Amino acid sequence: MSTSERNRPRTLAEALRTWDDAALGLLLQRRPDLAMPIPADTGQLAARATTNASAARAINRLDEFGVDLLESLSALPEPVNLAALATGVAQPVEVVRPRVDELLKLALVWGTEDDLRPIRAVHELLGPTPAGLGPVTTRHFGDLDQLIEDAGPDAREVLAKLTWGPPTGSVEKAERPVTIASARTPVERLLARGLVVPKDANTVVLPRQIGLHLRGGRVLASTRPTPPPLDGKTVSASIADRAAAGAALDLVRQVDRALEQLGTEPPPVLRTGGIGVRELRSLAGKIGADEQTTAAVLEFAYAAGLVAAAEIGTSEFWLPTSAYDDWLDLNLAHRWAQLVSAWFTGMRAIGLIGRRDSGGATAAARERLINALAPDLERLLAPEVRVLTLQALSKADAGSAPAPESVVTWVAWHRPRRGGQFRDDLVEWTITEAALLGLTGLGALAQHARPLLDAEPTVDDLAEAISPLVPEPVSEVLLQADLTAVAPGPLVRVVQDELSAMADVESQGGAAVYRFSEASVRRAFDLGRTADQLHKWLAEHSRTPVPQPLTYLIDDVARRHGVLRLGTASTYLRCDDEDVLTQLLSSNLPGIRFRRLAPTVVVSPSPPDMVLSRLREAGLAPLAETFDGVIHVTSGGTRRGDTPRRRSSRDFADSAVDLTDEQVKAVIEKVRAGDRIAAERPADEGLIEPIAPAETIAVLTNAAESHTRTWISYVDHNGTASERIVEPVRVADGWLTAYEDTTDHPRTYALHRISTARVVE
Amino acid sequence: MGDAVTDGPLIVQSDKTLLLETAHPDANDCRKAIAPFSELERAPEHVHTYRLTPLGLWNARAAGHDAEQVIDVLLRYSRYPVPHSLLVDIAETLDRYGRLRLEKHPQHGLVLVTTDRPVLEEVLRSAKVKPMLGDRIDDDTVLVHPSERGHLKQTLLKLGWPAEDLAGYVDGETHKIELVRDGWDVRPYQQQAVDSFWHGGSGVVVLPCGAGKTIVGAAAMAQASATTLILVTNTVSARQWKDELMRRTSLTEDEIGEYSGARKEIRPVTIATYQVMTTRRKGVYSHLELFDARDWGLIVYDEVHLLPAPIFRMTADLQTRRRIGLTATLVREDGREGDVFSLIGPKRYDAPWKDIEAQGWIAPADCVEVRVDLEQTERFVYATAEPEDRYRLAASTPAKSRLVRRIADHHAGEPLLVIGQYIDQLDELGERLECPVIKGETTVRERQRLFDAFRKGEIDRLVVSKVANFSIDLPEASVAIQVSGTFGSRQEEAQRLGRVLRPKGDGRTARFYSIVARDTVDAEFAAHRQRFLAEQGYAYTIVDAENLFA
């Protein structure tokens, strides 16, 4: 961008035409939006680069000092040379020069060191009063110092207040004409000299020239050309790594347990998406974590595609996916790496869970707490902040755990124009999530998290980085006389599955403790194992001799297991004469199968009347009996109906059941509610016509906004019409959610079943 | 990163249990290192389980251990990476002890002082704490009503901010007590226990059964040289204390009083039973005045883990007196470990495990569960019996009596105890074995006579009821047979069992038989017994009656 005085460019486009390919390439890399669609020429490229949208994108990615430089450039009177800019940001020229160079390369500024010009979009994006400086006046001042001196000490005090503060002050009748002679008050003396100018009837403002003069040429009182320091406590790096790895392994286990649980008892998908608070709480109890952690565990699994909503019958449930089975086949390191890399690039702002949705479309939606796995948690800023946060942690010295607040300031310095409070929240959430994921230990970034900050992090890199800290899977357990089996490390999957079939998990962590009980051994038998198989398997997989009480337990359960047998049959045949049954079994009756349960009992899956007629056809004379063993007499072919029981007056007199107090109360409530409905029914009773659905929705939506009681006429799914007074909460997706007068809980009404709705005054 | 997955003996689980592999060469060092801050939960043959609890951590904190040390121990011995959240939790828990301190202010008397103002603000907001406190002297100090010293500590512990009590003690009435070391001396660990207790002010000394807790008590009394109130579980135990004190110290019979159901003597050293202290007449505790009867300089609580609830309430008002608790275990069946911590004091001493092992309290006994079948008719009666009668029916089946006879014959000539719950059954067994029966109604004198005869070998069989089983001077035997009854508190019973059963002269291990009726509730109880005996490290086998001695 070396330019000489002679061919000094007059526009950004002209400047860009002088750039070499490398410089242009760099620009397109840093501002990729300029390349889409491909610009036709440099003119178009320059035009695109100066649009507010594109400039905003570039400025939003600047750090605090970059923004400060732009702000100063925008505030200082043109032409701005490097020295003036350096004074403007209160930094030496050599600090400013390389940073200005960057802005030039980003095409946010063009020109030369003695005439630096920000593109116009900068002025617009940074607003009319950059750095709290007032508007530029066209008036020319002579010796400003003298003018200020003349205004008097009390007027100078007023100026001092306006210098760094907001440049405006409120004054009555600001626009009255004043001359130096007629000036009475300090403000009037300033007005008379043009040192402040009226902004409107009640406000005066300090012009930019005066402000800059008073600030001594500085636009900003102080600036930070380098990121703020990351303060924190020191921890041992190896301890931090091990603590992080501990958390990582814990997480993998929790995901495993949570998903196993989802697989056995799938929770329904809420109508608004996500998983219900109650279901989450119950899941948290099952996996032994708090609700917040459980929500994060689910989200990590969701990001990695291990859990998804799936239809069972007519409803949707949260279920582990087939990817979960593939994930289980991976080793621990890879399982972890997959979760981490999905989280790192994922867009979901998990920290929003449990908060109110301030971005919700309706008032009701804004009231609602956000559930885990809820839709619409994607935020563009989330992955960006994650990278920055981990970078901040990596910038701290090895073994140093920066305090979260200092990470927040560090990230804020790097992206001052992005997100505000939400950005700061995201940083803190990222820190929490990174600890859960085992990327940090005791607050310090673990060695095995560093591959994430490489240019192209891969799952394999991550897995490889953590594998020295991951215990080797074991395939043997220690069996003890208190009927426990201790797996002194993560079990090989086949061993784990088999052991889980015969014993219950009691404690999990790096190792696992399983307990054998009568019930757990019986479960193994129910799953088809035999006592011999169990003995053999335990002997093979135990590092220690199998304790005698365990052997005894298995044999003891086996002794009783299956002593009682049950099955289904439609028909039984019993006969005291065993020979008759033997004969019967050997004679093939068409279409009838028999099984002999005992010498005198035979069963068949065929229905009794069929068996009966086949037996008669075969020349036998069977007698049917009822379940109680009473002889079942068939009434010769003619049919009769059951005698109905007629109600008599006796049914209503003495035998009447007493109502409980609650029932009485409920009845009264219903009656009273009915009264109210009658009383509050719109005056034009009898003339109530069903109104247009759109109108119904409008009435109900308004009522929901204002929490107004509303009279509705409703037809339930049995076709019964009823009138109700409700307080609508929200109208969405074809449903009205509302509180009914008599109940404490909201219920839902299908909108298409509401024929009329009127607001109750 | 080479040391990433170490080969340590310890596995730290995320549910705060610590698994120690006993066969590991470093197991013993590790055991010593983790003992100060974790509680041994079970000790079966291969892997011992310890648990980290807030109280355990605070005990360690009171003993001067800090988070760094605890975490360092865990990381040093841990085989696998320790979860980050667990370390954070440990550090935070440890950090909670001592943020609040009870101190004696030169002008204002008893005050609560904080080193962390927000914590003080938090507890001041508690409606339960408020009435116990007086005016606020400055930002960090608030007056405490002296009568509420104990209750305040209890409440603060419940709020999760246990206070360190540095407010000191009254000296009490001086009474000279000296140890008489004639041919014996205080063992080094006993002296250490006394020193740690005295240095800490008040607290609990944990020593296994038979490790000489009475001597620790006596040495503490000698250190205090003040009038002492000793609270013990029962009369037999009271007599033993008295005998031991007369043998070990300069105290004479006239100086030691017994305050029990039978006698009400108040002397410079008074031994009272929990039972008499908790006796109520017309709804009020009638012996409360004992606590004020003298200006006690020391209060000794024997068997702290059995301390009844009313004694806790009385103890809350005795916070200006030095208190020493003696016990074999801090685990309480009722979960009131927190009250022991806040009212008696933190754990001041724990015997090194090596010593316990060397004394052989646990190893020797072999446990055999023998299963007998109910007869056909009994099974029918059992099946149709009311649930509350079922245990008695199953536990006292005649099949058991026949088996006891068989076992007794098998062990003829060896000292043998039969333990049971149902008097009819015991009487029948007494007849069958032709030996005396000790039950609840047996007088203390008769009981001691029979125990003595048994010890001297004049009789070699004794049938005792569960009541007698509780007296601590049960003589040693090499065979014990339990026919009915469930165990009381877990560890204590197991240790008592270990104490009753001593190896025979020829080195053969002692035997503990428990006879169980198959497929009944009796077997269900047995399953619990099996679990905790195995957890205590006893060898355990189950055999069918027909296969016994086969």
Image (spheres, rainbow, N blue to C red):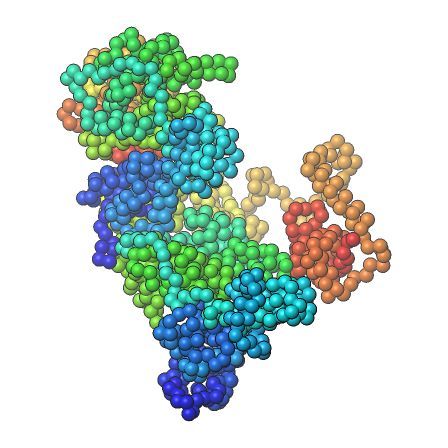
Residue B18 coordinates in the image, percent (x, y): 31, 43
Q: Residue at x 30, y 35 (%)?
A: B63
Which residue is at a point 40% across and 70% down the rendered structure image? A91
B416 vs A327, left or right, is left
- Residue A313 visible, this angle: no
Image quarter of the C terminus of chain B: top left
Q: Look at the image and tell me whether residue A49 can be seen.
A: yes
Q: Quadrant of residue A327?
A: bottom left
Q: Position of residue A368 (x, y in %)?
A: 58, 56
Residue B168 as seen in the image, left or right of residue B549: right
* Residue at the image point whose x is 73% and y is 66% from the top: A694
Vertical arrangement, residue A676 with respect to residue B455, above or below = below
Q: Is residue A422 above or below residue A24?
A: above
Q: Is residue A515 above or below residue B354?
A: below
Q: Percent position (x, y) of residue A228?
A: 39, 62
Quarter-of-image position of residue B549 = top left
Q: Nearer the viewer, residue B131 or B334?
A: B131
Please report the residue visible at 68 percent of the width from the left and 51 percent of the height from the top. Answer: A739
